[in-house]
Image (cartoon, helix red, strand yellow):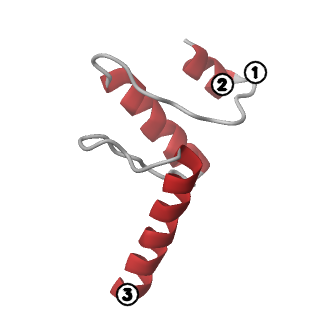
Amino acid sequence: MSGIASASAEQSIACAINRAAGGRPIPGNQVDLLIDGPDAYRRMLDVIAQASRWLHFENYIIRSDAVGWRFAE
């Protein structure tokens, strides 16, 4: 993807996130869009393990399987 196409896609994603959240992220916070199952799960579990106080986690399907139970733990 070219730099222009990438910037345009990033801007579209940012606008969609802002609409869904009802505003822009608070300065210092960050939103990561994770789209590939195994890599996304790994990244989410890393972030959970590294959280020092709290984190906001939104996910739509957690199955009763080995991966789902890792999130529940």
How far separated are the C-alphas under marks 1 and 3? 42 Å
State the residue at coordinates (31%, 40%): 29
Question: Is the C terminus in the top left, top right, bottom left or bottom right quadrant?
Answer: top right
22 lies above or below 67: below
In three-dimensional space, the C-alpha distance between marks 2 and 1, rounded to whole angstroms, equals: 5 Å
Q: Is residue 40 above or below residue 59?
A: below
Does residue 68 appear left or right of residue 51 in this picture? right
Name the image quarter holding residue 19: bottom right
Local crowd at mark 1 within 10 Å, few (<14), some, or many (≥20)? few
Give the quarter of the figure containing the N terminus: bottom left
Secondary structure found at label 1: loop
Compared to residue 2, the image places residue 66 above or below, namely above
Confirm or deny contact between disc 2 and disc 1 (CB under 8 A): yes
Above or below, 42 against 39 in this view is: above
Q: Position of residue 26 (x, y in %)?
A: 32, 41
Residue bearing the label numbered 2: 68
Which x, y percent locates residue 33?
49, 52
Amino acid type at mark 1: Ser
Amino acid found under the numbered disc labelled 2: Gly
As rendered, which of 35 and 39 lies closer to the eye?
Answer: 35
Label disc, if present, on residue 52 of the rendered structure: none
Between marks 1 and 3 in the image, the one whose residue lies nearer the viewer: 3
Query: Residue 42, how many percent across, how many down?
Result: 47, 38
- Residue appearing at x 66%, y 24% in the figure: 68
Tell me the number on the disc at residue 64: 1
Residue 60, x across and y down, in percent? 69, 36
- State the residue position of label 3: 4
Secondary structure of the residue carrying numbered label 3: helix
Residue 68 or 54: which is nearer the viewer?
54
Residue type for callout 3: Ile
Which label's residue is closer to the chain start, 3 or 2?
Answer: 3
